[in-house]
Every structure is written in C-alpha cells, then in structure tokens.
Image (cartoon, rainbow, N blue to C red):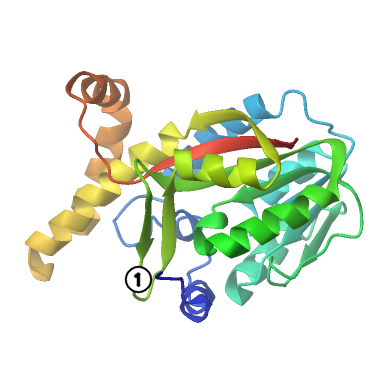
C-alpha cells in the first residue's frame, strides 16, 4: 500500500509562502489576494452555522493552524484557543498574526505528538487529515476523543474525491478520501457524524485552479498570461457561481476532480 512520505510533506510546508493564498493552495494561478479573503469569509458563514450550539466558554484546539486565519476567529469567539502548527514558516506567520490575542497559546509541534493538558470543547482540523496516512488519522482521532469535554465536538474540513481514496505523490503529497471513506474512519474511531456540508467556496476556487492547471500544461510558458487570465477566471467564477452549480446538477459533470467538505463529529 502506497503511503505518504512525511519528510516530503514537511519539506513542502516548510518552504510554503506564508501568504493568505498559500494555505489554500491558490498561489501561482494569478488570483488576486482578495480571493483568499472571499473564500475565508464564505467559509466563515458555514463555520458560524455549524457552531450555533457550541460552548463558547470553552477551549478550542486548532490543529494545523497555518497562518492563523481560523485561530484569530476562534480567539474572538471562544474563551481560550490552543493553536498547533509544525511548519516553521507558517508558525512564524501564525505568531505574527495572533500575538495581540491574550487568549491564544501557540505550539510549534507535530500534531501527532501533541497532547493538550486541558479538556477541549471544540477541535478544528482544517485540512490536516489529508496529510496523514490512515493509521495516523485513526490514532489521532482515538486520542482526540479522550480530550473532548462531554458535549465537545470536532469539525474537520477536508479535501475530498467522489469515490475511494487517491494518494498524490511527488513534491506535494496528500491523500484525498471520499466522504464515505471518511465516514467509515470516523465511525470506526468512535464518532457519530452529526453533519456533513459541502464546502461550495472551496469547490468554486478549485474549478478555476483545475482549469488553470490544464491551461499551463497545454500552453507554453511565455504565452500563458496567467497574470491576466487568473483574475479574469476568478471574477468570472464569482459572477457565474449559481449558474455553474445549476448546470452541474443538470448535466451531472464531475468537475472539478477535488471537492471539500465540513464534517461535524461527536463521540459516541
């Protein structure tokens, strides 16, 4: 069975540009900086809806915090936040962004080794499980289950495929699992899946990314005009958003290849 090379995963994120586009894998496609802000604000609406019944007086554990976009949101809405990020470049950006918050504690450590010392009311994993082999996903979830308060929940936001699992090799490595595969893993590690919500903002941006990736493969570099095409694609996607998904439902086109879902979990 093919597995992720954690050395390559860590190497990629150590070299990642700590911009708002980089954690969303949107760098290099000519998208304006505002595209990351748009996506985050759109995802924020989903998150707020999922957190309607959450205990805001408790502690949030933000695993794989990146540059701290979600960490700062949690700090403004919960009593205490523990942020964990192992990439040095992203950790430094996280510290710079969140240094003004007195209720955030930040750790530079591998999430597989981190053990919180306090009960947790909410655990957020924003695109973390896709960088772990299945055994490590199971081990992590089993451990996290014991850290949750009785009414605590886990929210995972993961890139998905429609069927089975696909592993991406090379300099950038990840495991893309289907919703059904994640459901099986969650249930077998002692969690009830309370809610699954498709991440439309992610899928919208992924449509543009997949188009531009194919464009780069077909068109020679000197005439790709990514700096012009990227913003045009981005604003077209935003303008045509409802129409695109309407057409997709009618003709059943499986595009883009990658999707993204929010999973809300509660220990059984």
Residue that appears at 87% across and 36% down: 150
Percent of width and height locating residue 231:
27, 46
Residue that appears at 50% across and 43% down: 37
Is 228 placed above or below 56 here? below
Q: Left of 184 or right of it: where is 50?
A: right
Q: Is residue 6 visible?
A: yes
Q: Left of 3 or right of it: where is 93?
A: right
Q: Tell me the SS state at disc 1.
A: loop
Binning the other alpha carbons within 10 Å of mark 1 as few (below 14), some (14 to 19) or many (20 upward) gives: some
Percent of width and height locating residue 34:
44, 45
Residue that appears at 72% across and 23% down: 52
Q: Is residue 63 visible?
A: no
Q: Nearer the viewer, residue 225 or 60?
A: 60
Q: Left of 16 or right of it: where is 265?
A: right
Quadrant in the rendering for residue 92: bottom right
Is 176 placed above or below 245 here? below
> Mark 1 sits on what residue?
169
Q: Left of 56 or right of it: where is 184?
A: left
Is 126 placed above or below 50 here? below
- Give the quadrant of the N terminus: bottom left
Residue that appears at 78% across and 45% down: 75
Is 16 placed above or below 103 here? below
Q: Nearer the viewer, residue 32 or 190?
A: 190
């Amino acid at each position: 069975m093919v597995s992720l090379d954690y050395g390559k995963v860590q190497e990629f994120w150590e070299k990642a540009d700590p911009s708002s586009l980089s954690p969303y894998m949107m760098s290099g496609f000519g998208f304006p900086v505002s595209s990351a802000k748009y996506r985050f604000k759109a995802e924020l609406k989903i998150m707020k809806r999922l957190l309607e019944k959450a205990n805001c007086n408790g502690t949030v554990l933000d695993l794989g915090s990146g540059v701290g976009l979600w960490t700062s949101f949690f700090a403004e809405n919960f009593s205490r936040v523990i942020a964990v990020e192992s990439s040095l470049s992203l950790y430094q950006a996280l510290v710079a962004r969140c240094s003004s918050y007195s209720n955030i504690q930040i750790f530079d450590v591998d999430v597989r080794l981190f053990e919180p010392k306090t009960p947790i009311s909410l655990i957020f994993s924003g695109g973390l499980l896709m960088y772990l082999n299945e055994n490590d996903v199971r081990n992590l979830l089993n451990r996290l289950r014991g850290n949750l308060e009785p009414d605590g929940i886990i929210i995972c936001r993961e890139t998905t495929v429609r069927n089975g699992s696909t592993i991406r090799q090379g300099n950038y490595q990840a495991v893309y699992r289907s919703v059904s595969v994640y459901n099986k893993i969650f249930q077998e590690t002692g969690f009830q899946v309370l809610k699954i919500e498709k991440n439309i903002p992610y899928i919208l941006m992924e449509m543009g990314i997949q188009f531009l990736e194919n464009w780069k493969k077909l068109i020679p570099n000197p005439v790709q005009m990514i700096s012009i095409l990227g913003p045009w694609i981005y604003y077209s996607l935003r303008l045509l958003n409802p129409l695109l998904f309407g057409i997709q439902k009618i003709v059943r086109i499986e595009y883009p290849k990658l999707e993204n879902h929010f999973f809300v979990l509660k220990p059984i």
